[in-house]
Image (tube, grey):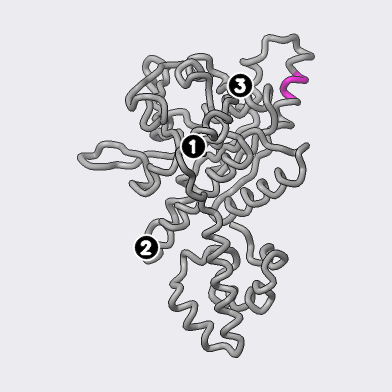
Amino acid sequence: MAPLKSLEQRYPIIDSNFQGFCASHGIFSEDFLLHDMHALVVSAEQHNTSARLKQGINQVLASIDALHQPWLNGMELLEDVLQRKNILSTGCQCIDDFLNGGLRDGHLIELVGPSSSGKTQVCFMIASNVARSSGRVVFLDTCNSFSPKRVAEVVSQMSDNSTSKAKKSLEHVMSNIVCYSVFDIFTMFDVVHHLKSTMRSQSGCRARMLIIDSISSLITPILGGSGAHGGRALMASAGFILKQLANEHNLPVLVTNHMVAGEAGLLKPALGESWKSIPHIRLLLSRDSARHISSISVLKHPNMATGDRVEFQIL
């Protein structure tokens, strides 16, 4: 999420005095939702600039509300669907056929799976194919799992060219994947905010896809303890800002999520009921190690039935 200092130019009320007040409460970005608003306002009232401080608090809360998408009527939704005809190939023909071509622009897609199911490998495959054929991929690595060596292997398996052409293809792909190490949700907000600003001002640096591996590693730490309510609000804001990015800049956003034990020990997607309604599409990845076969099944999709399934092999 944007640092408070970066908001000062747009909102003069968020000046150095206001930033200092927030810093005294451990607030350095728009992470107000993790804090008790009543206690913050009471603290502001103790200052001789209390009215201005409270105006600053209201301004930051208004900027957070602005992240939420506006209401759309049915006709606007239909026009939006008809305009979003572009689809990116995943690099796997079986998955593309299953998903009616691949990943559609404007969608937030969640790939859920247990540990060792191959979520990161699927991300590498998709990132390599998009970077090779469509444009720049922004990859947010939250678990130190990004492997340039593995990406190079994927590109090599995709290429049928001569050695010299394969080398150029690898250089092209690697230069088109921009990887950020992101270990907390506030850094993710900062990166997405920067990405949106860059895409608005520099058409030549336009990203073609955003991948976050994994979103649950960023959100899970803020959901527990006394700040659980604020954590859920931040989780909703994260979902909205990712959907807003996908919608405004017409690109697919792919996030991965792990699984946790549910009732009777059965595995279920992490992040709970509040999160599951946020992505446009939820896909479950599983792997049969004995057969060396992976499968994807539909948990949620606007145009497919829940439970639809396809088998494939990861490159």
- How far apart in space, not on screen, are marks 3 and 2 (Cα)? 41 Å
> Residue 36, percent across and down?
44, 72
Identify the residue at horizontal 40%, vertical 21% (top origin): 295
Residue topped by disc 1: 75
Residue sitting nearer the eye, 69 or 147: 69
Position above or below: 172 against 42: above
Residue 136 is marked as none
How many residues crowd mark 3 within 10 Å: few (<14), some (14–19), many (20+)? many
Residue topped by disc 2: 225
> Residue 38, percent across and down?
43, 77
Q: Are marks 1 and 2 in contact (CB under 8 Å)?
A: no
Determine whether the residue tagged by mark 3 lies in a helix, strand or loop.
helix
> Residue 184, percent across and down?
54, 53
Position above or below: 21 against 125: below
Q: Are marks 1 and 3 in contact (CB under 8 Å)?
A: no
Q: Which residues are magenta?
A: 167-171
| Residue 141 part of the magenta segment | no
Determine whether the residue tagged by mark 2 lies in a helix, strand or loop.
helix
How many residues crowd mark 1 within 10 Å: few (<14), some (14–19), many (20+)? few
In the image as oriented, which residue stretches furthest toward the left?
Answer: 264
How many residues crowd mark 2 within 10 Å: few (<14), some (14–19), many (20+)? few
| Amino acid type, callout 2 | Gly
Residue topped by disc 3: 154
| Residue 169 part of the magenta segment | yes
Mark toward the viewer: 1 or 2: 1
| Amino acid type, callout 1 | Met
